[in-house]
Amino acid sequence: MIEIENLSKTFTLHNQGGAVLRVIEAARLSVAPGECVALTGASGAGKSTLMRMIYGNYRAASGRILVGGVDVARAEPRAIIRLRRETLGYVSQFLRVVPRVPTLDVVAEPLRAVGVPVEDARERARGLLARLNIPERLWSLSPTTFSGGEQQRVNIARGFAHPYPALLLDEPTASLDTANREVVLRLIEEAKARGAAMIGIFHDEAARARVCDREIDVSRFAPARAA
Amino acid sequence: MSYTPLLSVRGIGKRYGAHVGCIDVSFDLWPGEVMGIVGESGSGKSTLLNCMAGHLVPDAGQVIFDTRADGPRDTVTMSEPERRMLGRTDWAFVHQHARDGLRMGVSAGGNVGERLMAVGARHYGDIRGKATDWLERVEIDPGRIDDRPSTFSGGMQQRLQIARNLVTGPRLVFMDEPTGGLDVSVQARLLDLLRGLVRDMGLSAVIVTHDLAVVRLLADQLMVMKSGRVVEAGLTDQVLDDPQHGYTQLLVSSVLQV
Amino acid sequence: MTETAYNFAYLDEQTKRMIRRALLKALAIPGYQVPFASREMPMPYGWGTGGVQVSAAVLTPDDVLKVIDQGADDTTNAVSIRSFFQRTAGVATTTRTQEATVIQTRHRIPEVPLTEGQILVYQVPIPEPLRFLEPRESETRKMHALEDYGLMHVKLYEDISRHGHIATAYAYPVRVEARYVMDPSPIPKFDNPKLGDCPAIQLFGAGREQRLYALPPWTQVVSLDFEDHPFEPSKADHPCGLCGATDSYLDEVIVDDVGGRMFVCSDTDYCEARQAQGHRGKDAA
């Protein structure tokens, strides 16, 4: 489902004398449907950078990133937009939404974007918010005013609303209490069971051990220090 | 996924004497997509928008629109009656200053109804019904249908302008700094409204702004302009989070973080 | 000063030729406003300088001229224009609609149906029906050219939304031959149905605005309206106090200072002719 071949990434800082930072070189990995792969490595090794490249958020310098047959490294913007809408989900730690939109609609939006009728989408959103223990009285409010933990859970609900065939998980269980951590791990297991291919960053070792089939240390994709 | 872009801009250029408005701008906009154009004042983004919308005649290039009747047509060379007909049916233009896009001496209902009447609506009750419906959609109390826009707040005027533009169900909306000059809270409400309308009506839009937060929330694609040229284009979050061009890096790093 | 000091009908021949050319163009494009080089006339703007120039251009020595102001032959404006042409053209004049070959009018169409061979000349203050909604002449001309007339209905919409009905009572806009929207001059909308399918030639002159327009005989003229608020030619719901007519447009006349009033035909010729035939209204002496 996700195939990465010979991928590299550089950052050119034009406003700092054109300094070129090489961060990833010759990365390769492959994730099959129903498989969850953990990215590991020290902080700064490039886990988040790799995830962002798979999502099309960062531009690849060279190589291929095939997600469901689409090469994210080369695809037109509209192909990536479509991929993100239908195929590739991303659960990040940070929520970015339009102010004033009720939480229920924030969570339902990915379903609305693929044409699910508004009531069906909200029904699914209600179920997820309830599972993630967001009090019902908050559903009609914008999540912009919520606590950090609540925002994170809203974001997880949003990420799992649409059954994406591929999912990127960026620290989904970080700073959650035991009960909510358990809910999130169950959501991941359910996604695996329905055949989703997943790549995740987990600092929570127990969680990683429970849901991940393999680990890939991204340090091995680090360029030679000589650069 | 459709196979024809709704709008294909090819090599658009416009000079004002020795001064450059914009040079060699090309892009495709697909149905349902929102294109953001950012850049500082004088970067040529408004010139480009006005060339696309038919308000200015470009010196070079084509603006090819996928018309309902005849498929893709170059709107630069089409006759003025045809272009005006597009302007009141399939196209809409939202001005930065609502008073440029509204008739200040005409009631809110008359403002919304004008495009309907321009394309032949002749039933007062129907026109009023549609106007009422649109006032509600843009969150204006329908009880104010007979009030003139001069009695409205800035945010209401802008929402009225949007209702007036969208009432005929256009497929492409041009917006020139739609949230400029509004309070931050009013901006948020307007952005939310625009996002909902874009999604529910399947609208395509071209939005010119200098506000990166606005394009992050509304635009799928982004073009960055400087001195009349497009220096970088791509997925909005890619351009903002991993800018390749020095100017874009400067622009992104200049935004105050809240 | 002697009458021979003037060219026939006051204007010089070149000017009349220029106006006739503009009139021919106006007749060829019914409802379209043709610019013309309006001359200074020996009367102030607003007193019919446009109408007078059109009359001067179409008058021949054999014509019989009638001049009315708000339907009346005997008001100052009508009398002075009539005597102007008597003096400068030496044409015969009349107050009888049937006898006239050229009728110059301000704000009315005579009650007696016009006939083939007659010319009705309207004095027009503001020829542009879109003016009050769109003040830019460059823009209104473009709107006419492109038949972009949504704005005209906006005006009627505003009327209904404010008054519950179309309150425009005079200068009620019309569409000519399904093409140009035209201001019929400030005639009451009661007269609008007489504009269309008329056997006579109708010419409109706006002196200050330097515009001419025309309706050739038998032109289709439709008053603008909404399906659910159709056009209605209205008049005061009374018979004429002098001749008892129920089919004519009426003026309201205050007769004393205690609220007494009477309704009389605004067309004085029509009213007098009826009285001569023995018709009497309730206020007749």
Image: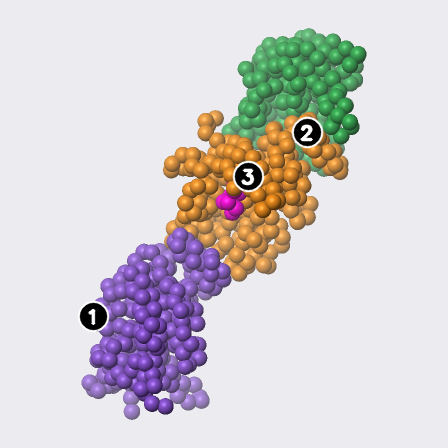
Chain colours: A green, B orange, C purple
- Residue range in magenta is B51-58
Write down the quadrant of residue A14 in the picture: top right
Question: What is the CA distance from the residue labelled 1 to the residue labelled 3?
Answer: 60 Å
Q: Can residue C241 be seen in this view?
A: no
Q: Mark 3 points at which residue?
A: B13
Amino acid type at image mark 2: His
Q: Is the magenta stretch mostly helix, strand or loop?
A: loop
Q: In this view, does C83 lie above or below C126?
A: below
- Magenta segment includes B244: no
Question: Up-down: is A12 above or below B160?
Answer: above
Residue B114: x and y in percent read 46, 53
Q: Where is residue C285 in the image (x, y as percent from the top left)?
A: 29, 91
How many numbered discs, if any? 3
Query: Between A166 and C268, which is closer to the camera in this rendering?
Result: C268
Residues B76 and B189: in front is: B76
Q: Which amino acid does label 3 sit on?
A: Gly
- 3 or 2: mark nearer the eye: 3
Q: Give the residue at mark 1.
A: C116
Q: Where is residue B215 in the image (x, y as percent from the top left)?
A: 63, 36
Asked if badge 1 and badge 3 are on a common chain, one would say no
Element type at mark 3? strand
Classed neighbour count for the residue bearing mark 3: other residues with Cα under 10 Å, few (<14), some (14–19), many (≥20): many
How busy is the neighbourhood of tag 1: few (under 14 within 10 Å), some, or many (20 plus)?
A: few
Residue name at image x 54 percent, y 32 percent: B27
Q: In which quarter of the image is the N terminus of chain C?
A: bottom left
Q: Which numbered disc, 3 or 2, marks the residue that appears first in the sequence?
A: 3
